[in-house]
Image: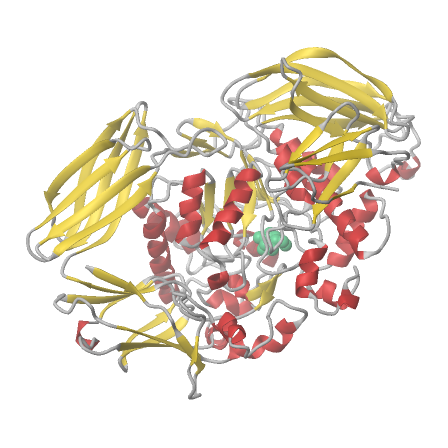
Amino acid sequence: MQSYTLKNWSYRQAGTDTWKPARKDLETTEIHPDLFANGEIVDPFVDDNEKSLQWIGEKDWEYKASFDVTDKTASNHLLIFEGLDTFADVFLNGHKILSTESMFVQYQKQVKQYVQLDGPNELRIVFRAALLVARELEKKTFKAKGFNGESSRMQIRKAQYHYGWDWGPLFMTCGPYRPVRFVSYNSRIEDMYAKVSVAKDSASVDFQVSLDVTGPSVLELSVKSPDGHEVHHSKQDAVSGDNSIRFSLQNPQLWFPFSHGTPHLYDFTVSLKSQQGLETVTKRIGLRKVELVQEPFKDQPGTSFYFKVNDVPVYSSGSNWIPAHSFQTCLTKRDYEEWLQLMVDGNQNMIRVWGGGYYEQEVFYTECDRLGILVWQDFMFACGQYPAYPEYIKLVSDEVETQLKRLRNYCSLVLFAGNNEDYQVAEQVGLEWDKSDTSGHYEHTNFPARTLYEGVFPKLVSKFYPEVPYHPGSPWGGQDTADATIGDIHQWNVWHGSQEKYQDWYKLGGRFVSEFGMEALPSRKTYEACITDKSELYPQSYLVDFHNRSDGFERRLALYVIENIKVEGLDFDSWIYATQLMQAECLGYAYRCWRREWRGDGRRYSGGAIVWQINDCWPVASWAIVDHFKRPKLAYYSVRRESRPVGVGMYRNESKDPDPVLDIPDQEGAPFDYRPVHLAVDIWGVNSSLKDVKGTLKVDAYNVSTGERVGGLDDQSVVLKANQTSEFVKNMKISNKIPVVVYSRVVDEEGGIVASAGDWPQPLKYLKFPDRKVEIVVEKDQVVLTVNKPVKGVELSLESDLFIDDNGFDLFPGDSKVVKIKGLKSTDSVKVHYYQKQ
Ligand code: BMA
């Protein structure tokens, strides 16, 4: 078997004569980056260049590449197209061999009769303008409703964010965006799948290999454990079609998410020996069992929604993932490695691949397996009313089969979800549908796409990857998509919707919050990279606004900043800091109060929080907690702090004395309720490790204005119970006369801080911070900070982009805060800013 991946593509606009080289040495490519690399267009991400580049999506484009046949005696020659974006006619040496209509389907074509053994073979692909094809299709079907992008997008199987989204530009690109392989063979391994079932102390594996063989051949399998021992070896006669090798492993080293253990991987090496030669493939496979636990509670309505991995309940703390670039082929392996390392460094054990992008590249899932990150995978449908006529169902079934077969050897997959927010769109459009109808066929109802989400997809998942649970949509469950007691919710009533205060997140939680978010501007460096006119670098400029796509962002950013943060000035740096501090506070609050609801067996009221979103596809102000250039915003760190394996949580309760008149709900005049507010703080511990952690709880209260210690609690011994919340203090009373910040920490026997948290008077804008001193000592690979009085939101910044391991934190007297910055030299300059620095 010989396999060659085509590269060094050339391109031209259809109907023109001159071919130009695509970006050199790349196996996969797309039209916009190729035009840019050749100086034919301006940089799509800079300024408002997007506007002048729309013509590209309205044209047809051609790509070509050539290859030689090196194995001239092979009886089969096969072309495998792992992804063509989207409507492509494929010609080999002038013969049309294929037409495609989905970027998510893998197409294969036997091409023996068309190849030239002695000469170069030319593969030419004509990509039709998907934008125009979709509009034509829409005319034949119906004009559907959706959020984001034009309505015709739902007609075609192309990454939906190419149409523009509320964080992304509109670039209808095209090209061979996944590899095209030419394979010559007599015998070959077509596919393999390790179907694993994990029991107590053992795992049984049904290893299925699909082969195409000519003549007598032998199939061999060797399995090596994570510590390098061969734990299985077998040989058998190979047959064309399905071959199965069954065996079991005693005391297997199971795969766990990094938050709960080690992501062990076994090496499965398969060889096919035939007269013509040997083909060997090795895959790294993790053994694990996944369950989605949806059980009723004794004392609360609805059902749980959380994951168990190898019988261990796992609280999911994580992020939503969108495509990390508008042009997928601009991303390198290193980009994926760095993005996913940021997840691990940020204590985030789950990533949700959102339904408006792609089924990700192999390297994404390989890294998630290796690092131990759980993957929630949506099918690629987002925010719209999708059709479900027979040809469309067939096309989508091919897509889902392609993707399930591709993804089923990745153990990091823990959930498939049918779509993103399509049920929400149906509700907003005013559709009513019969939820008791479980036939799986809804083609003739007013909500035909249910046929996909509730009929076709679950069947395909249970056929091709039954180890992974299926959920019809995100969000889905209960009375409607807003039902917080069953299934998952997208909680957008902070920012979108009713624009609640983020201090009220605790009321807005659910069994699993798979989306919620808050915007902030990225760093100044990021704007400098995408705005050429430096006089545009101010908060309200045309170009700064152009690099924000969310509806009403000016008002909403202002609302949440003005409600909470004292704005130090409307210059660019102050505004960036204000939005980032506000986002960090907002998201930190959410993680803190929802994780508290992970209360132990039978009481896992909340199973996870997945923030919208970790990344950006271009330089933009969005909900991302890390910007397009991988620069963390301050919120990345508040999420990181609240997701630590062992942590402390606090919440400030407000109450008033009962009053017969003012307590009547909606009482007119209630805004003039001047009864004093009583303040009391709850303190608890969280621990996602599988061992109890013992320590001493120390609590101090300070007057924020003077910095003076005004109270606290006697030290108390505490146990943070394994894998659940432990309540420590209920209603510690604090003064309502002065602004009091409460600082809690758990320390170990040596006095080292195991976990800490501060709880500040709200809103922060009313606080004053006179006479603060932050001392910083810059050392090799770290800085050490100390303060004379409590300080809020300390931001460290560097000239370089070294990774700072904590930022935007609070400091309290008596502590020496060590922040690790690998690569830092003691002579480097580190800038320190903090909230209301004078
Ligand atoms: C959601 C997502 C996206 C969107 C985001 C922010 O609900 O599913 O469609 O970008 O909100 O509005």
Q: Residue at x 57, y 59 (%)?
A: 617
Residue 261 percent coordinates (x, y): 45, 29
- Relative to 154, is 587 above or below? above
One can see residue 508 in this view: no
Answer left or right for 401 relative to 668.
left
Taking the view exactly as shown, the residue that stands out farthest to the front is: 827
Q: Quarter holding the C terminus? A: top right
Seen at 61% across and 28% down, the residue is 597
Q: Is residue 735 left or right of residue 605?
A: right
Task: State left or right for residue 226 relative to residue 813.
Answer: left
Quadrant where the N terminus lies?
bottom left
Residue 666: x %, y % from top left: 83, 38
Residue placed at 73% from the left, 45% from the top? 829
Residue 614 lies, with reference to residue 793, above or below; the image says: below
Quadrant in the rendering for residue 72: bottom left
Report the front residue among 150 and 403: 403
Is 578 drawn above or below residue 706 in the view shown? below
Q: Report the front residue among 313 and 510.
A: 313
Q: Residue at x 42, y 31 (%)?
A: 262
Residue furthest to the left in view is 216
Q: How is the image coloured?
A: secondary structure
| Viewer-side residue, 700 vs 318 | 700
Looking at the picture, how far across and down is residue 422, in whole percent?
A: 53, 54
Above or below, 168 relative to 218:
below
Q: How many marks?
A: 0
**Is 811 on the left or on the right of 214, as rendered?**
right
Quadrant position of residue 186: bottom left
- Residue 515: x %, y % from top left: 59, 45
* Residue 588 visible, this angle: yes
